[in-house]
Amino acid sequence: MLNGMTGGIIVTYLITLLSAKQSRRIRVIENILHNKRTVTTLFWGMRYQILPWLGSMRQLERADFDAQLSQLVAAGLANISQNQVLLSSAGYQAQLQFWQHHQRPQFLKFYLLGDIDKMEKRVLLAGQVLSEYSFQNKNYAPLSFDGDELRAVKLWFHQQNKSNLVFQFKQELTTFLSTLGEQQANFLVMQLVGHKVAGWSTEQAAEQLELPVIDATMVRRDLWAGLTGFFVDKTGPMHDLIAPLIQATPLSHSTQITYELFNRGYSIEQICRARHLKLSTIREHLLEVAIFLPRKFPFQTFLSDPVMQQLEQHYQGNVDQWQFNATDKSDGQSFFYFRLFQIMRSYQEYAQ
Amino acid sequence: MLSEQQLTKFLQQKFGYESFRPGQLDVVTAVMNGQNTLAVLPTGAGKTLLYQLPAYLMNGSVVIVSPLLSLMQDQVARLRSNGEKSVTMLSSLQSVSQRQATLAHLSQFRFIFASPEILAQQNVSDALQRISVSLFVVDEAHCVSQWGPNFRPHYLMLKGLIQHLGKPTTLMLTATATKRVQRDILDKLGLDKQSVKSAVRSVNRENIFMAVKKLRTSEAKNQELLELVTQLTGPGIIYFSSRKQATQIAGWLQEQTGLAVAAYHAGIDQTARYKIQHQFMQNKLQIICATSAFGMGIDKDDIRFVIHYHLCANLENYVQEIGRAGRDGNQSIAILLYCDGDERIPQRLNQLTIPSPQVVIDFVSGRVTVDQLGESGELLSFYVSAGWNAERINQSFIERKQQEKEQLNAMLQYIMSEHCRRNLVLAYFDETTMQHDDGCCDGEQTEWSAATLGLQRENEAYIVPPKGQFNWLQQLDSLFFENS
C-alpha cells in the first residue's frame, strides 16, 4: 500500500493518464474509464492517447475519481481549471517517479479486443471445469452464477475433443505463461480455481508476490489482455473458448453496421434511409470509425481537395487548440469535416 | 406416504446423513402430508434439508423465496456441489433475455430461487402459475414480519402469490422468531393459524459459551481482539458493521498474527468471494472478517468462535449470527466486544432509514418524488399505493422506532447484565430458563479462558504460506490431473 505514497498521498495509475503539456478534460478521462462512448469522449480520448483504457474501470464511482484528482491537486501535483487538469512540474516528476516504482502495462494493444473482464471470467470458469473434469469430479459449485457464461463454457466443453483436452489446455497455458516473467506467470496462475484449489484473490496474490495492490489490479487486467492477444490468432481450445468474446473492431455494434453498409458503397444518405437513423447519427458513426480505424478510413472520400484546402488554411498548429468556426452550423456538415480533419491530422501526427 | 424408515433410508442415500437431526423429521413429514408448516429452528439445525428432501419425493418444482442474493447464491452453489443441476435463480443478475429463457422452461427446474421483488412481477407469477409448484418455501420468514423502514414491502405480496398459485403447501423457515413474530408471519401470509403445523425448537445452543468484553477505547478493543484470536483455536468469524473496518482489521490481524485472515463482504467481487469462501471451507483461512449481512450461507461445521466487533441491532440477529459456531456440536464460543457508545452505530442506521414526518407529508402530497428519496421512496410509494395517508405512515414509523429502540435495549441488557446471559436470551424468546453453570456464559461472575473451555490454540496451521514459494508450473500440475 505504501509504495504509491508521494507527499503523503496515494498516487494511483490515474497520474499516468495525465499530462504536463496537455490540459485534459476531467470528464473525458472519467468517461473513457467508464466506457461512456460519445464521439466527443472518443475523440479526446484519442487526443490524450488513452483509448486503450476505454472501459477499464466500469465500476468507477465518480466520488472516488474526483477524490483521487483532488488529492493530486492538494499535493500540488496537478491543477484544475475549467474542468481540465494539467500536471504541475512537481506532478510531472511524480509521474516519472511513479513509473520507476510501478509496473507498466505490457499489453495495451490488446485492451480493446473485447471486454477483458469477461475474458477473465470465462477462462477461469473453463479452467475450473477442466480441472474438476481431470479429477473426474462432477459435484462442485461452478465459479459463476451467470447463466449465459455457464452455457457458453458448457457448449465449448461439449464441442472439444475430450481425449486430450486437459493436456492441450494446460499446454496452451504453459506456452503463454512462459512468455511472461516469473512473477507475472505466478500471479496469473494464482488466480486459477479448480479441484480442491480455491485460488487466490487479487489482494492475496499481490500480498504473496509483494506487489502493491494498485499494481495488482492493473497487472491483472493487463495479463488477461495479454492472454487474449496471445490466442486471438491461434487455433486450439483456448482460442475457441475466447473467440466468441473477441470483437473484430472496437466499434460499437451500431457503428459496425453503418461501417459495413459504407464499405458496400452506400452513401451517407442511403445509410440514413436504410437504417432509419438521423444524418447526425450516421456522421457520428463514421467519426467513430475514423478514430478507431484511421488507417482504413478513406478521409479523402469526404474531404475533397477544395474542402481540404479550406480546412488547411483555417486550422494549423496544435490540433487541441483548434476552435471550430463555421457559417453553416445548421446541418452539422462543416463540423463533421472539421472533426474528420482533426482526426486525420492527429493520425498523421502520431504516425510520424 | 413414506414411513420413517423409508425417509431415513432416502436421507442416507441422497444426502449421506446417517439420521435426521432433531426436529427435521417432524417438519419433513408434515410438508409431505401437504400441511403448511412454520419451522423455527436454530442456525445449524439443517433447515435447507427441510425443503431439499421433499423436493425429490414430490412432483413439481419447489419455489424458495429468499431475501438476499448472496444467500441464494450460497444455496444454489451448495445444491450444485451436491450434483443437482436443475436449479435456477430468478435474480437481478439476469438479463431480460436470460429471464425470459428461464421462465419459458421453468418446469424443468426442481429448485427455483427468487426474491420477493422478482416474484411480484406479473410475468414471473404467471409463469409460476403455469407449472406445478409442489412446495412454496419462505426462507428467513421473519422478514415477512418486519415492518417500517427496514421492511421489504414485497413480502406482503406473497400472500396474494400463494393464492394465485392455488395455495401450494407453504413452508416458512426462520432461526429466530418470538411468539409475536410467529403469529405475525402467519397473519401476513394469510395462513390459518389452526391448521399450520408449528415446529419450534429452542434458540439455545448449549455448546456455545457466551461472553462479553467491555472495553474503554477502540485501541483496547483491537488489543483484546488480537489477544483473543491469538489464544483461541479457529476457525472463526469476526463480525463488523462496516465493510471498511472488516477489511482494515483483517489486514491488521494477518500482519500481527501471521494467521491467514481475509475480509468477506458485499463489497468484494464475486470471484474473490468464491475464493475466500472456499479457502475457509478448505481450512486454508483461519479467520473471516465479515459484515453482518454476509456469511449467512457459509457451510462449515467446525467454526469454533464468533466474535462481534460491533453489537447487533437486536438479539434476533445476534443469536442467528453466533449460531454459525459449533454446528458440529463441539465446544465453541461467542464473544461480543463492546465500547461505550457502540450502540450509536445501530441507532444512526435506524435513523438514516426513517424519513422525517415532513418528508412523508411532502411525499404523499407529491412535492417529493421516489427518485429523490431512494430506498425509503420505494417504501413510501408502496404504502401510498396501499391507500395509507401520511398520518398513518408516520404513526407506523413512530411505532417502528419504538420497537427498534426496545430491541436495541434488549441487546444492551445482554451486554450489561451481570447475570446469566443465556437465560436472558431464553427469556427474551419466551423460553424456559435453565440452571447456569461454568460452561454456560461469563455471567454470574463466571471465570473462563480459552484453556478452561478447551479452545486453546495448539497448532500452527493456517498460517499464511511463506512468500516466494509459489511455483506456477507446480500449481498447474495440481490443477490439471493427467492420466498417464
Image (cartoon, coloured by chain):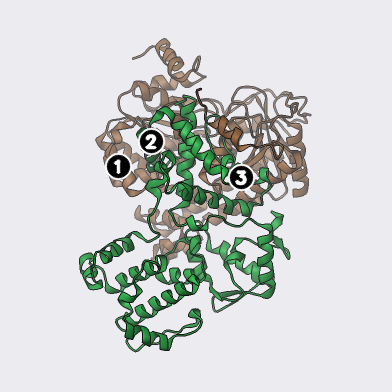
Chain colours: A green, B brown
Residue B4 vertical position relative to residue B343 in the rendered view, above or below: above
Question: Which picture quadrant has residue B464?
Answer: top right
Disc 3 vs disc 1: Cβ atoms closer than 8 Å?
no
Q: Secondary structure at mark 2?
A: helix
Real-space CA distance between mark 1 and mark 2, rounded to the nearest whole angstrom: 17 Å
Residue B144 location, quadrant: top left
Residue beneath label 1, please? B101
Q: Is residue B173 visible?
A: no
Res A257 seen here: yes
The picture places residue B376, in percent across and down from the top left corner, at 46, 56
Q: How many residues crowd around disc 2 within 10 Å: few (fewer than 14), some, or many (20 or more)?
A: some
Q: Which residue is mark 2?
A: A154
Figure disc tally: 3
Where's residue B167, x and y in %?
30, 32
Viewed as shown, does residue B332 lie left or right of A178?
Answer: right
Left or right: residue B215 compared with residue A181: right
Q: Which residue is mark 3?
A: B408
What kind of element bears circle 1?
helix
> What amino acid is found at the position of numbered circle 2 in the picture?
Lys
Along the line of sight, which residue is nearer the eye, B103 or A108? A108
Q: Is residue B387 above or below residue A242?
A: below
Residue at 29% across, 44% down: B100
The chain letter under disc 1 is B
Q: Amino acid at mark 1?
A: Ala
Q: Residues within 10 Å of mark 3 (few under 14, many from 20)?
A: many
Extreme residue in the top direction: B5
Outermost residue to the front: A352
| Distance of label 2 from label 3 (alpha carbons) | 50 Å
Q: Is residue A327 above or below residue B136?
A: below
Circle 1 packing at 10 Å, graded few (<14), some (14-19), many (20+), is few
Q: Nearer the viewer, residue B145 or A316?
A: A316
